[in-house]
Image: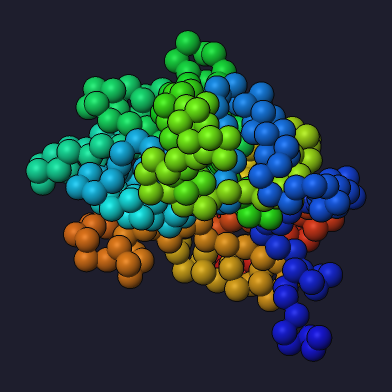
Amino acid sequence: MSPENRYDNDRPEWIPYARQSIDESDIQAVVQALRSNYVTQGPRIRWFEDALKELTGARHAIAVSSGTAALHLSCLCLDVTDGFSGIVPANTFVATANCLRFSGAKAIFADVDSQSGLAQAEHFNSAIEGSVKNGIKPKALLPVSYSGSCPDLEGIRKLADEHDMRVIHDASHSIGASYLSSDRSAHRSGSCAHADVAVFSFHPVKPICSGEGGALLTNDQAVAKRARALRSHGVERSEETVTKIGPWGYDQVELGLNYRMTELQAALGYSQLGKLDEFVQKRLALARRYNDFLSQAEFKKVFERPLLDERSSWHLYVIRFQESSLRDKAYHFLKERDIGTQVHYIPLYRHSYYEGGNHEELPGSESFYKACLSLPMYPALEEKDQDRTIEALKLFCERVTA
Ligand SMILES: *Cc1c(COP(=O)(O)O)cnc(C)c1O
């Protein structure tokens, strides 16, 4: 392969902003799945789902082919479909809003806190008030655990209950994280203590990886049953169908999809899940180390570091620049030094697809977007590479403040 078309991640000097951590035991787990009698619809899906239930405390876990698939099924199972709408933070990945559109529902955007990038109950409340003024009563709120920190899910649940709305927690960033409720008790992200449904993603940049993959978690038996059917063409197999039709019996009860996860993905996900705590601890240690170094005055003149949320899964480590032009320059400056960074996220209303849906600019989201930059953060990030990133940032700050 010529050097021109090598992928960045194949260059030894390149530090990506995120990447998977796969070891020999993960590889062996996938090889065993390949050698087994099932490459899809076998026992590993159950192992993985049971482990996800144990981790979160949620009563039901349904593994699917991606986080996006889990979000889509969430909307279908809660009937957030044609003629309805849901509220999504403007600062998220497009999939959070797209799931509403797949189901025929409308996406309404909530502003976010300009410091944390999170949409809290107050932001959802403003979005509800705005929609009601326009004659629309949203059916669901979709809080997002941006960067790995959970928003105030208890407050958001309360707001949803006041308005008879459903809650879909997009926990794609926050498997392994937890949050406190007002009585100081701790809840695992994905537990659905304050949500009808929670969703994880196992994309390689997320806390654990299954290649592609996702999961839907819920405490609602009916939602779980429906999600299981919809994941596999809307087909149900029960004692009833067997009695009625015969031992080969199955019945398509509604229009479903093929959103199944393979045994290869489940094997990898299950193996990775055993390392989740270790991964999150490594991320937290890196976040502490960044925060210690970046507290020095020379950095603070140029950017702010994030608050150290000890309960976050630290999917992203996001700094905020005083000026948008400096953020843009820093991105290029670091890239020239083989350090990958990313902007999370371009507010949803800025995308061509969502333009013209009378989505106004939201001030918190705009200012967060213009300031934010995600620095390299993943369990296998070595201290020497973190040091190289910090040194490069130091040089950048010296140059722009000289
Ligand atoms: C990654 C991500 C998704 C989508 O997950 P996929 O597994 O890539 O489909 C949805 N929402 C958020 C916030 C994400 O970061």
- Residue in the foreground of this view, choosing between 82 and 89: 82
Name the residue nearer the viewer: 301 or 240: 240
Residue depicted at x 53% and y 35%? 246
Question: Can residue 11 be seen from the camera position used here?
Answer: yes
Image quarter of residue 346 = bottom left
Which quadrant of the structure image shows residue 276?
Answer: top right
Q: Which residue is nearer to you in this view: 215 or 362?
A: 215
Q: Position of residue 145 (x, y in %)?
A: 50, 39
Q: How far from the left and from the top, in percent, is residue 268?
A: 75, 47
Q: Position of residue 107 (x, y in %)?
A: 29, 51
At 52% across and 53% down in the image, what residue appears?
258
Of all residues shown, which one is farthest toward the top? 183
Write down the quadrant of residue 147 in the picture.
Answer: top right
In the picture shown, does residue 346 fall above or below 168? below
* Residue 391 vs residue 205, the one in the foreground: 205
Residue at image position (51%, 69%) is 328
- The structure's colour scheme is rainbow
- Residue at point 22%, 44% (across, down): 84
Q: Is residue 293 visible?
A: no
Numbered marks: total: 0
Q: Quadrant of the C terminus?
A: bottom right
Of the 4 image quadrants, the one containing the N terminus is bottom right
Residue 370, percent across and down?
43, 60
Q: Is residue 270 left or right of residue 180?
A: right
Q: Is residue 149 above or below residue 219?
A: below
